[in-house]
Amino acid sequence: MSLKKSPWLLHYDGSSCNGCDIEVLACLTPLYDAERFGVINTGNPRHADLLLLTGSINHQNEEVVRNLYAQMPEPKVVLAVGICATSGGVFADCYNVKGGADKVLPVDVYVPGCAARPEAIIDGIVRALGVLEQKRAAAEAKK
Amino acid sequence: MEKLMPALAYALLAPLAGGLLAGADRIVSARMQRRVGPPLLQPFYDVAKLFSKGDVEVNSLQYPLALCHLLFMALAGALFFGGGDILLVIFVFTVAALFLVAAAFSSASPYSFVGAERELIIILAAEPALLIAAAAIYKVSGSLNFHAVAASGAPLIKQLPGVFLCLFYVLTMKLRKSPFDLSYSHHAHQEIVKGITTDLGGRTLALIEITHWYENILLLGLVYLFFAFSAPLALAAVALTYFLEVLADNTNARVRWQLALSSTWTITLLLAGGNLLALYALGGN
Amino acid sequence: MHTDTAVSYLVASLILCPLALALALLAAPGLRTRNLLVRAGALLTGAGALACAAAGGAGAYYFRGEIHGLETLFLAASLGLAGVMLRYAFKYKRPLAGALALAQAGLTLYFDLACAPGVAADNAFYADKFSLLMALVIGVLGPLICVYALGYMRDFHRHYPRLPDRRNFFFFLLFVFLSAMFGVVFSNHLGHMLFFWEVTTVCSFLLIGHTRTREAVNNAFLALNINLTGGLAFSLALIWLARNSGIVELDKMLALRGAALLPAALLCYAAITKAAQFPFSSWLLGAMVAPTPTSALLHSSTMVKAGVFLVLKMAPVIAGTAVGNAVALIGAGTFLAASIVNITEPNVKKVLAYSTVANLGLIVACGGVGGPAAVWIGLVLIVFHAVSKSLLFLVVGTVENRFYTKDMENYDNLIVKMPVTALLFVAGIAGMFIAPFGVVVSKWAAIEAFLKVPSAFGAALVIMIAYGSAATVFYWSKLLGKILSMRDQPGVEKKREATIGNDEWTAEWAHALLSFAVCAGLPLLSAWLVEPYLLAQYGAPGGLGNFNYGVITMLLFLLVALPALAWALHRRAAYRLSDTYVCGRQMDSHLLVGGAMGSWREITLKNYYLDGFFDSGAILRYSNYFLGAVVAFMLAAGVIWKN
């Protein structure tokens, strides 16, 4: 139960228009106050449970995203926030874009929207927590 | 035995009290920002989660060093409340802080490295104030034992107002509050990454959080001492001090280390040093 | 007063044995004889010092030292010494050094021919608990450094093949130095003490100039000049005492108390030059050009310790006078300024040197304040500082001979490259600034002792110590951080320790164990040598009290046990190693980071020196001016002050 009550997230902006990034930060503002659920925006993969990706994956940031994910301690989940992160969005056909986050990482939760609404993001985080619990249960069963 | 009991009580209860204080801190901070904030027990949830996370480390030194950070901080506090010499407590307190600095240095990450250097600057800035405060307490009460000073009934605050103000200033650094949270902040908006804890995660970070609870209770114990002639007043003063620190935290941006260092050293010299010298001029003893 | 034959023979042999060995070393035909002689001499000297300390049971011993022709011998030797100085001054065209040496010779002649004959000297030598404590420091650490030097000098000359190999002379000087130090601490006749004092000056001059490079020669003459002015002051004190009070002995001078204030001020001047206090510290910093065993010797058991020894001896005379306060101010001011300047210093050997200057400042301050509590600190700090500082120099020398660098920035990853050496390094650094090791204990005790001074002057000293102490934490921690910064990936060079010889290991491990032993054994050491001395001098023992000794011992145990336990527990734990965080970029073991467009950029991690914040040049300049004025005030007060 403890995992559920303390979701710390790492927000990585791939190559978005910053619309989603502003909405992610809006989650922390008084109106939405995501900290009610213990959410902390850590900015550091070692402290994070959730990797929140906005924007599409391109050839430049592919390695960075992989590294950040590798540096997070288990169990961990990946959220793709906004349409660019889920599929590449309008940038999908660009010469430098690979596509959505699931091209390089196992995405657990997709949050649609352009930009994604704060309510949707918070809902995505809450759903991701369920996945987190499942992952931990699976890891414990494996032991 | 009477020395052991308070020390033991500190070792067992300080994490509890410190954790609740941290929870209250977060709620009060949230209210100052017109938010609801997390539950009171949130810090405990966080630490429990950190302990349950898988272990990822950068090298084999970090975890042992962080563990020593915790143990020596608990030791410093136990010495303080157990009636050890306050000057010695300050030196052990510094040793505890150095274990964290060493843990950060041991990682080759530039962020961690800069965090460690900044933590050292904080130690550099705060140490004179702590030592002079202890010296002044000794000068006034003739003792450096927590219980003896408390029992002496000497109203330290009356004779040492300058020292207390200086201590309040330095407490902002030690409690890791803005504008002096140079090496590590609890607020994301202050950080590029996470300063001194950049490469410390999982249970290593959990140890550091618990240490911070120990540290806060120890520092507030020092505040208590200034009002120890009346326990209710002292508790109220402690609460007010902490509230003011949270207020400062929420109303200030981080300053540059130059200003942090120069202002602290100047204030220490003028307020604490001046107060200590004034004791002789006024012929109190 | 007893005279105990056993102690007198031991004292005589402590002075003479190293001298005999030195002469034998000068004539040693080859490497094996030299190694054998040095090791045997070290063992003998150490055993002699221990036996002497063990035999010197109760009280102080005074020896008449009535040997026919002893005075003539000392005079001849003094003139010989002046001849040596003049020869070098002439050879290198240094008129100032020549003039000072000539003046010194003139004063010595004047004293010996015009003053001394009319004065009755009862006891030429003595051994009290303080001199026995000093003898232990000299006789245990000194020989270990000599043994270490065997290995060091071999590597040193291997690396600098073009330097002339004058190792026999080098080891000759080391043992003469030890002999002279024993002479200083056991001489009751101030004329003899002055002779030994001058021998240490000349020995350090020759050791600093060992490589005979231009820099070495310049710095050697700097040391010579500064210390010769001290020698001149010493001579003047001697002549004043002989002419005005009819005294040439230390114990009689101390018994005069306030009546001997002027000679005490002059002796303090000599001591302050030798102890490299501001404004005279430059010679000790310059001495860093010498091979590292020289530094280890100068900083720990010899030379500078003769200076603080003399200040602490003068404490009963100067305490509470303007002279005493000036001395305390010089000491505390030096502690503060040297500590702050050290923050900006990247050269490891200079960091060690400034730290020595600072710690000696604390001892000098204690001597100036006087009284049992402060002098207790001075005595134990001599021991603690000697052990830890010597260890640090030995370790730095070992690292230097492997990597040929003195820059702190090149010490990172030492824990991987040379793990055992790094561990010893950490032990040495811990000894300098981590509670409960002696240096911190001394600061702690000093703050409480200075607060007992009735005037606000004590509080001013405390404030200076508080600031200096903070600076101390900063500069040691960043060096510690460099050593512990760890990149244990494949591709990092290891196994640099296989080339370290047994002589070096023995000396380093012995030092490391000693640094723990003196801390754990502080109550015993204090009760055995320090408290009896203070009781005899002041009627009170000083010291910290049993509760605090208990806490110190417990802390020391925990400081070893807890990290060891944490380390052992963690070795068993399973964890995943990951890269360090560099914004998600890849970083390899050589600190190369993948940048944009497939480029690789190197990361350099440099310590903070705060040199934009602390202007070390200005701090040095102004503290030298200020403390120079205080020195002048001290001498003036010696003339004017009347009790």
Image (cartoon, coloured by chain):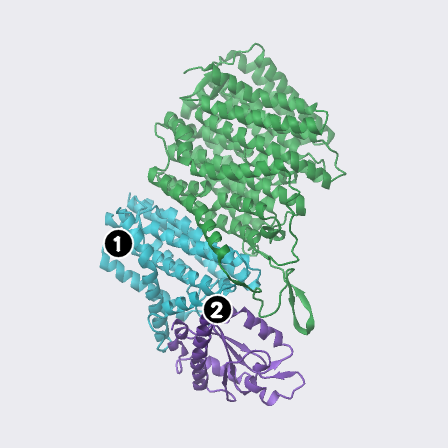
Chain colours: A purple, B cyan, C green
Mark 2 closeness class: few <14, some 14–19, many ≥20 residues within 10 Å: many
- Residue B125 vs residue A56, the one in the foreground: A56
In the rendered structure, which amino acid carries the disc numbered 2? Answer: His
Which type of secondary structure does the marked residue at label 2 adopt?
helix
- Asked if labels 1 and 2 touch by Cβ distance under 8 angstroms, the answer is no
The CA span between labels 2 and 1 is 40 Å
Is C81 above or below relative to C621? above
Residue C434 position in % (x across, y down):
46, 46
Counting from the top left corner in percent of width and height, residue C178 is at 58, 27
**Label 1 neighbour load within 10 Å: few <14, some 14-19, many 20+:** many
Q: Quadrant of the C terminus of chain B?
A: top left
Which disc number belongs to residue A75?
none
Does residue B105 sit above or below C388 in this rendering?
A: below
Which residue occupies the extreme top position in the image? C68
In the rendered image, the residue lying farthest to the front is A142
Q: Amino acid at mark 1?
A: Ala
Task: Give coordinates of residue A97: x percent, y percent.
Answer: 64, 83
Can you say whether C343 is above or below C30 in the image? below
- Image point (58%, 75%), residue name: A65
Residue B178: tell me if it is visible: no
Number of numbered discs? 2
Q: Residue beneath label 1, please?
A: B228
Towards the viewer: C18 or B28: C18
Chain under disc 2: A
Q: From this viewpoint, which residue is outermost toward the right?
A: C162
The residue where tag 2 is placed is A47
